[in-house]
Image: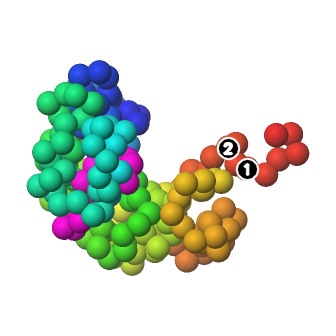
Amino acid sequence: MAHRGLHDQMHPENSLGAFEQACAQGYAIELDVVLTGDGVPVVIHDANTARLTSVNLDVASTSLEDLQQLRLLGTDESIPTMEAVTRLVAGRTPILVELKTGPSAGAVGPPVVEALRRFGVTHALMSFDPRMLGWARRHAPQSPRVQLSGALRGEPLPLIAKLLVRSMVTNVVTWPQAIAYDVFSAPSLGL
């Protein structure tokens, strides 16, 4: 699986070029989705554009138009929309979609699932946020769900939510088909 696409110096992570390279070489793709300030799902890992563009913008507070003016790591690549990625992939390879914590599931879920369906993309939805998977269970039951968990450092979840997700208690509500747990966060006397 190509984590954030099959990226290199000419095709940065989570770019259309990185996703094209993954498709061409037969890799499935893992990617991250964040909502823009005007409610459009874009494919970027960070909540802020600074690391990839050297411009300090909060994705959730910035319009799609402004975000697409930025260039990724000095290349011609820009931050792609989820729709552009699904159009490019169009059933050529599976996508593992991480729905990032932040926006409401009812805001991010529908346009993401619609784009995946429209372009016939085999996929699974994953998130650290059980509210995302709860939404998917109710509104997109045909989409496999993966609960992410671990120490949850840096995840913008309230402490009580982190404790519930770490312990997997929320799985009785979200019924994920798979769990991805950071092995270094697992309780163990040997670690």
In the rendered view, tell whether residue 135 sits above or below residue 50: below
Q: Amino acid at mark 1?
A: Ala
Q: Which part of the image, by quadrant, shows the C terminus?
A: top right
For the residue labelled by badge 2, is the local secondary structure a helix, a strand or a loop? helix
Q: Position of residue 3 (x, y in %)?
A: 40, 36
The x and y percentages for residue 85 are 20, 46
Q: In terms of image quadrants, where is residue 184?
A: top right
Q: Residue at x 37, y 47 (%)?
A: 45
Q: Which residue is mark 2?
A: 183
Q: Position of residue 175 (x, y in %)?
A: 53, 70
Q: Residue 43 colored magenta?
A: yes
Q: Residues within 10 Å of mark 1 (few under 14, many from 20)?
A: some
77 relative position to 28: left or right: left
Quote the CA–CA distance across marks 2 and 1.
Answer: 5 Å
Indicate the quadrant where residue 159 lies.
bottom right
Callout 2 amino acid: Val
Residue shown at the point (30%, 67%) measured from the top left? 108
Instruction: Kindly identify which numbered label has been placed on residue 122.
Output: none
Residue under the image location 23 percent in, 65 percent down: 37
Q: Which mark is residue 186?
A: 1
51 magenta-colored: no
- In this picture, which residue range is highlighted in magenta? 36-47
Closer-to-camera residue (59/104): 59
Q: Residue furthest top?
A: 9
